Image (cartoon, rainbow, N blue to C red):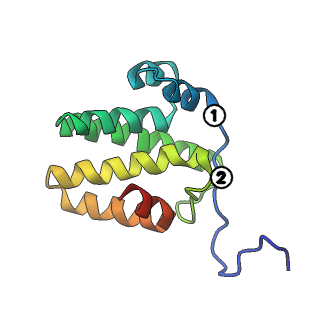
Amino acid sequence: MGIHENLLGGPPPTHLPDDPEPRELLAAGEPPADVAAKYPTSSLAWARLADDAFERGSVVESYAYARTGYHRGLDALRRSGWKGHGPVPWEHEPNRGFLRALHALARAAQSIGEQAEYERCATFLRDSSATAADTLG
């Protein structure tokens, strides 16, 4: 039995490929809108836009940004072999953009009273990464 074999019989963790440029630009203080325009497939840039909108009280705008980041992340997960379920570890930094967008989508859905969407996204986040769910709140 290999050291990294999944003993629970579920799908293996999905690790998105690293895309350091958007992460580095955001860390350097580049506005998230500029980063999203330059790297529109970056879930992290869309998640940051969602966070910024939410913080200033623009919940519907936050929802739209989060949904974009979520769908960009789903596309990337599928390209990486994800089959619609299984772990997406927070510990793998390139996964964090998708997980942050999913969290932002849940938060915005709850804020506009879309309870079913909130519950679906919150469950999806916890099922993907308990660490992400605990870290992001």
Residue 15 image label: 2
* Above or below 59: residue 92: below
Question: Relative to 94, is 130 above or below?
Answer: below
Q: Residue at coordinates 26% horizontally, 59% vertically from top-left?
A: 118
Q: Quadrant of residue 48?
A: top left
Is disc 1 surrounded by few (<14), some (14 to 19) or many (20+) residues within 10 Å? few
Residue 118 in the figure: left or right of residue 80: left
Q: Residue, x 46% and y 20% (percent of image)?
A: 30
Q: Report the residue that reaches farthest toward the front.
A: 28
**Three-letter amino acid code at the position of disc 1:** Asp
Q: Where the C terminus falls, by quadrant?
A: bottom left
Tag count: 2
Q: Position of residue 12 (x, y in %)?
A: 67, 66
Query: Is residue 2 left or right of 16 when viewed as pictured?
Result: right
**Which label belongs to residue 19?**
1
Residue 18 as seen in the image, left or right of residue 26? right
Image quadrant assignment for residue 2: bottom right
Residue type at the position of mark 2: His
Residue displayed at 24% across by 38% down: 55
Q: Pinpoint residue 89: horizontal percent, then vertical percent.
A: 58, 59
**Quarter holding the N terminus?**
bottom right
The location of residue 7, given as percent across then percent down, is: 70, 81
Q: Disc 2 on helix, strand or loop?
A: loop
Quadrant of residue 62 in the image?
A: top left
Q: Position of residue 111 (x, y in %)?
A: 17, 51
Q: Nearer the viewer, residue 114 or 135?
A: 135
* Element class at badge 1: loop
Q: Which mark is residue 51?
A: none
